[in-house]
Amino acid sequence: SADPHLPVGTRYIYHFSTNTSTSLQGAQVEGSGLGLQGLVTLDVLGPCQMALQHFQLTSILGSKVEVLKESESLSAVLGREPLRFVLQAGRVVRLCPRPAEPRWALNVKRAVLSLLQGHPGARDPQTVEEVDILGRCPTTYQQFGTRLHKTKELTRCSLRRARTSLRSQALPAAEEQPGLASRLTCIQNSDGGDLTLSSLLYEWEETPSQATVATGAASVRKLCLAQATSFEATELFLTLVTELRGLSADELMELWGLSFKCRDNWQPLVDALPSCGTEACVGLMAELIVSGEVEADETEAWLWSLAFVPEPTDAMVRALLTPGASSSAFLGISALVHNLCVSLDGPCEQLPGIGSLVRILGDAVGANCTFQEPSDADQVRTAHILGVAP
């Protein structure tokens, strides 16, 4: 672990290896596998500040270790941009990647740094909550002689976003829930340019969207013609959601102007917006609510869906703080804010949108978060949002 006492200028060289194998139990055919192994250099730049650089890779295929021609090019890409990070008490608390760093390369470095995280001074078994490329997981450290064992129960991890068309996020499984056991055990033997703060959590590399206003309008028309309970309608709806995520705010507004109601007064675009989850989609829905173009029940359902937006931003919060917003709307907004602050893993009240929300809620409750009886329902609801109501 690297703490402030590590001498500036010290260099550490680590050997790492990872191998993923897949096989069928009882099958005669040998399973397949893929992995990496190699050397990586860590330089101490200052108190708690380090840099990961100088990769030397060897590819692993199945049970055989082979030096492939791609290894040299992989090493070059991974070593091109040093990754600065902050290490405190054995935990990687911040990454400072360069904008030019490919996302896949950054994920490889996240995986390597996840292996290096430790729990200094652990003697007896200790279980802590640790964030790394696998998510936020209960992690048990136990010393066996000169070896430190680190074990994670993957079924109890959170922040492990599943890769599906509906943008879901895996939650910790209940301990009594039946299923396959999933456990990870690791054994450890004892500048210039702009930087953007990041974390060790895995980051998906998004495929550039090919969506246009025309393709979105075509999907809406096809949905109107398809039977509501058919598999075709389900597939078309998921396609529309995917297309909405690739459109800008102006393009979404243009698409809204071209859209129309189908049979039984159904508006596919309004139903698809809660599953979209982008800043542009949140902004459009907020505008439609303010202008009265969305029914009250649809508005309430959408506000509740804000708790499941996978990547909340402060811009979303600002878009939702519209004049005349009801206290019930703040329940959904506060859930969005909670998830945003958790994802930042640090103070978030300095963000403009969150600061404005706190001031609005404070004014609604009254001085010192107290109010005289009798209190109306809006005040009680607002107090619950702030966490000060009994």
Image (cartoon, helix red, strand yellow):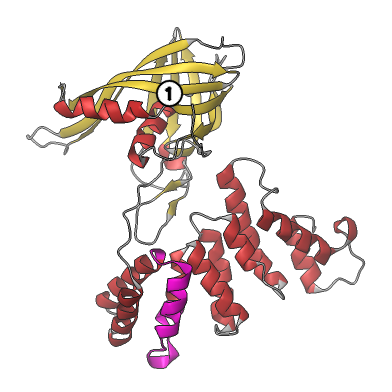
Q: Main secondary structure of the magenta part?
A: helix
Residue most extreme to the right: 372
Residue most extreme to the bottom: 264
Residue 308 coordinates in the image, percent (x, y): 51, 60
Describe residue 285's horizontal placement relative to residue 16 as left or right. Answer: right
Q: Is residue 135 above or below residue 218?
A: above
**Residue 62 sits inside the magenta stretch:** no
Q: Nearer the viewer, residue 87 or 44?
A: 44
Q: Residue at x 86, y 71 (%)?
A: 375
Residue 1 seen in render: no
Q: Is residue 156 above or below residue 337?
A: above
Q: Quadrant of residue 187?
A: top left
Q: Residue at x 67, y 71 (%)?
A: 322
Amino acid identity at mark 1: Leu
Quadrant housing the C terminus: bottom right
Q: Nearer the viewer, residue 96 or 142?
A: 96
Circle 1 packing at 10 Å, graded few (<14), some (14-19), many (20+), is: many
Residue 72 coordinates in the image, percent (x, y): 22, 24
Residue most extreme to the front: 192
Q: Which residue has dot 1 on it?
A: 52
Magenta part of the protein: which range? 245-270
Q: Is residue 6 above or below residue 315?
A: above
Q: Is residue 72 above or below residue 301?
A: above
Residue 163 coordinates in the image, percent (x, y): 35, 52
Q: Callout 1: helix, strand or loop? A: strand
